Amino acid sequence: MNSLDYQHIFHEIKNTVTLINSSAQLLNTKCPQLDTEPYWNNIKHEITYLKNMVLEISQSGSTEQLQKEFLDVNSLLEDICRLMKDTYSDLQWNLQLDQHLPFINADHIKLKQAILNLLKNSAEAESKYITITTKTENTGIQLIITDCGGGIPLALEDKVFELFTTSKEHGTGLGLAIARQIIKSHQGTLILNNHPGEGCTFTITLPVL
């Protein structure tokens, strides 16, 4: 099956999920008493799950072909943080950026999506702050994201980058898996340092090409 086949299938799935969601919202408006039915709550939960899954897949795109360009990671992070501050205004955002960080050769859109996935994971873990650090490391650069959201349950720690692994009520289990795939496609690495009860640190290492 080629990429066009996958795109067609995904398009059909997306349209179907959108139709189901719209119909459910209309039905709920006309019949508000449905909110008292436990089966209806299950249906809404599953629709939310499908919506989130479709959104994450559509935003990630394919990592098979990268549109690389010379990229200032510090500027990218500043732009991302401005966006995240609007969405998560209660969080404290700390930027500790190496002002001598070299440019890298990367796909701007896909790398942005990988970073957003990691930041959303930290923000939705009820962390009070998120610290983002950049520094030069040997022949590459490092981007370090630290939060205080309580860490990842030990039972999930070894599977956190696997598809559909999540501890969140409406989580899809795709965000971290997609982030690692994108970083890997850039010949980089994504490592988790988990501190249960305290928080997480995600370290991205990317080569300077």
Image: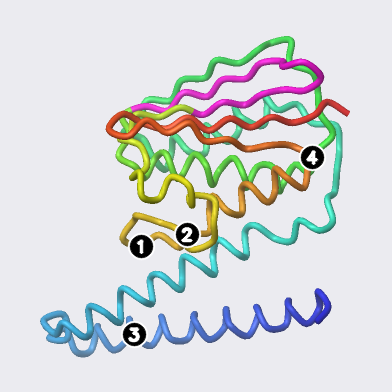
Q: Quadrant of the N terminus?
A: bottom right
**What secondary structure is found at the residue carrying circle 2?**
loop
Label whose residue precedes the other's in the sequence (3 or 2)? 3
Residue with the mark numbered 2: 173
Q: Quadrant of residue 126?
A: top left
Question: Which secondary structure, mark 1?
Answer: loop
Dot label at residue 187: 4
Of 89 and 38, the residue lying toward us: 38
* Tags 3 and 2 touching, CB below 8 Å: no
Q: Quadrant of the C terminus?
A: top right
Badge count: 4
Q: Residue at x 54, y 61 (%)?
A: 163
| Spatial separation of the CA atoms under disc 4 and disc 3 | 43 Å
Q: Earlier in the sequence, mark 1 or mark 3?
A: 3
Which is nearer the N-term, disc 2 or disc 4?
2
Q: Which mark is residue 24?
A: 3
Q: Residues within 10 Å of mark 4 (few under 14, many from 20)?
A: few
Q: Is residue 73 magenta?
A: no
**Mark 1 crowdedness (10 Å alpha carbons): few <14, some 14-19, many ≥20:** some
Q: Is residue 24 left or right of residue 163?
A: left
Residue interval drawn in magenta: 129-145
- Counting from the top left corner in percent of width and height, residue 154 is at 35, 44
What amino acid is labelled 1 in the image?
Answer: His
Magenta segment, prevailing SS (helix, strand or loop): strand
Mark toward the start of the polypeptide (4 vs 1): 1
Residue indicated by mark 1:
170
